[in-house]
C-alpha cells in the first residue's frame, strides 16, 4: 500500500525534497526572526477564506472565529519554520491529520485552500520570492498529505505516519 507521504507527492506533484526544502535553512530567521511575516500571511489567507464567494468552502471554517484560526495557523507556521514553539505551548502536538478529522478535506477543498494560500503568499510583501516558492511547495504537499489522511481515517484505518509536515524537528 502507498504511504501517505507517497500519495501526497503523487497527488500534489511536489517531490518530498522540494516539500521539505523549508528545512534546508531556517525560514523564521531568514524572514527577520519575528512573527510578523507569519501574522501577515495568515491574516491575508484567512481574510480570503472567510470572504470566499464559494459558500461550500467558507462553511468548512464556520465553526471557528477568524481571529482564532489566524492565531492557530501563524503559531503553527512559526514553529514549523524554525521559530519558537508557540503552537505546541498553547495547543499541544500539531497532529495535523487528527485535527482535520472533523473537516471534509477533499481534493477539491485542498485546491481551494491552495488557491487562497497562493494568492496570500503572492501578496505578502514581508516574504521574499525564494521563501514564497519553498512555502508553497510545503503547503501543496501538506494539503495533499491531509487529503490522503482524510481518506484513510474515513476508511477506518489508523494514520501512524513518521511524516515531517507537523514536526518542528524533522523525523530521522
Ligand atoms: C485548522 C481546514 C489545509 C494547518 C483548520 C481548520 C479548518 C481547516 C476548517 C479549523 C480552523 C481553526 O479553528 O483553526 C483545512 C482544509 C485544508 C487545510 C479544508 C485543505 C487541504 C491545511 C494545511 C495546513 C493546515 C495545508 C498546514 C500547512 C492547520 C492548522 C490548524 C488548521 C495548524 C489549526 C489546528 C488547531 O489549532 O486545532 N484547517 N485545512 N491546514 N489547519 Fe487546516
Image (cartoon, rainbow, N blue to C red):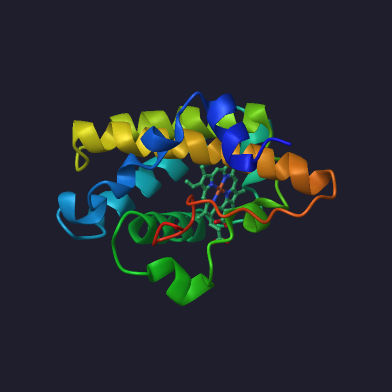
**Is residue 107 shown left or right of residue 168?**
right
Residue 105: image quadrant is top right
Residue 76: image quadrant is bottom left
Quadrant for the N terminus in the image:
top right
Instruction: From this view, report whether residue 84 is shown above or below residue 25.
Output: below
Q: Is 42 or 62 nearer to us in this picture?
A: 42
Residue 119 on image: x %, y %? 38, 29
Q: Is 38 or 44 nearer to us in this picture?
A: 38
Quadrant for the C terminus in the image:
bottom left
Q: Residue at x 32, y 45 (%)?
A: 22
Residue 77 on image: x %, y %? 38, 54
**Residue farthest to the right, as pictured:** 156
Q: Can residue 109 be seen in this view?
A: yes
Q: Is 103 or 59 nearer to us in this picture?
A: 103
**Residue farthest to the top, as pictured:** 13
Q: Is 83 or 62 nearer to us in this picture?
A: 83
Residue 92 on image: x %, y %? 53, 72
Instruction: From this view, report whether residue 102 is shown above or below residue 90.
Output: above
Residue 124 on image: x %, y %? 26, 38
Amino acid at each position: 500500500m502507498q504511504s501517505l507521504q507517497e500519495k501526497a507527492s503523487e497527488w500534489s506533484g511536489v517531490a518530498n525534497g522540494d516539500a521539505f526544502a523549508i528545512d534546508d535553512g531556517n525560514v523564521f530567521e531568514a524572514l527577520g526572526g519575528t512573527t510578523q511575516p507569519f501574522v501577515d500571511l495568515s491574516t491575508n489567507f484567512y481574510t480570503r477564506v472567510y470572504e470566499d464567494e464559494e459558500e461550500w468552502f467558507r462553511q468548512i471554517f464556520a465553526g471557528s472565529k477568524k481571529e482564532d484560526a489566524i492565531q492557530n495557523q501563524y503559531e503553527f507556521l512559526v514553529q514549523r519554520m524554525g521559530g519558537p514553539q508557540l503552537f505546541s505551548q498553547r495547543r499541544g502536538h500539531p497532529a495535523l491529520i487528527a485535527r482535520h478529522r472533523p473537516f471534509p478535506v477533499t481534493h477539491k477543498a485542498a485546491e481551494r485552500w491552495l488557491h487562497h494560500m497562493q494568492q496570500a503568499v503572492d501578496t505578502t510583501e514581508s516574504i521574499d520570492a525564494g521563501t514564497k516558492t519553498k512555502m508553497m511547495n510545503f503547503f501543496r504537499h501538506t494539503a495533499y498529505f491531509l487529503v490522503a489522511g482524510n481518506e484513510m481515517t474515513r476508511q477506518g484505518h489508523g494514520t501512524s505516519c513518521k511524516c515531517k509536515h507537523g514536526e518542528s524537528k524533522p523525523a530521522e
